[in-house]
Amino acid sequence: MATITELKCAVRETLESRGVLGQLKARIRAEVFGALDDRREPRPPLSHENLLLNELIREYLEFNKYRHTASVLTAGRRFLPQPDLPMLDEFYHL
């Protein structure tokens, strides 16, 4: 019969091999940052330039396969007011 330590090791290895462990860690980080976010203090409006920078950073992270880091950035965005997105379409010539 396997010990608790062996079982933990087996579960960890399985989650790592499936790519789930990194996703779980990123999701937990995003939720912790969201919980710590002080919503009483209003955020400054998100300018089109900052939105563009955020998108470029997200694309860079995804291009370089930093998907877990990108997921934290994306999760943090849900707490921000979303400006007009047609500006991005114009930038990308869509």
Image (cartoon, grey):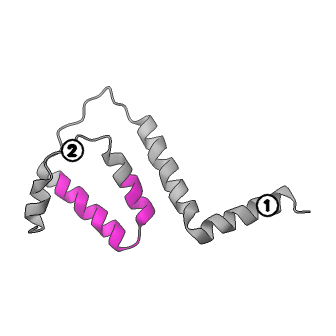
Of 43 and 83, nearer the camera is: 83
Tell me which residue sits at (38%, 60%) in the image: 70
Of 4 and 85, nearer the camera is: 85
**Quarter of the rendering occupied by the C terminus:** bottom left
Tell me which residue sits at (55%, 67%) in the image: 19
Number of numbered tags placed on the structure image = 2
**Which residue appears farthest toward the front when viewing the image?**
94
- Vertical placement of residue 48 versus 69, above or below: above
Residue labelled with disc 1: 7
Q: CA distance from mark 2 to mark 1?
A: 44 Å
Give the magenta part as a residue range. Answer: 51-73
- Vertical placement of residue 47 versus 71, above or below: above
Give amino acid for label 2: Gln
Q: Would residue 83 be counted in the magenta stretch?
A: no
Q: Residues within 10 Å of mark 1 (few under 14, many from 20)?
A: few
Residue labelled with disc 2: 82
CB contact under 8 Å: marks 2 and 1: no
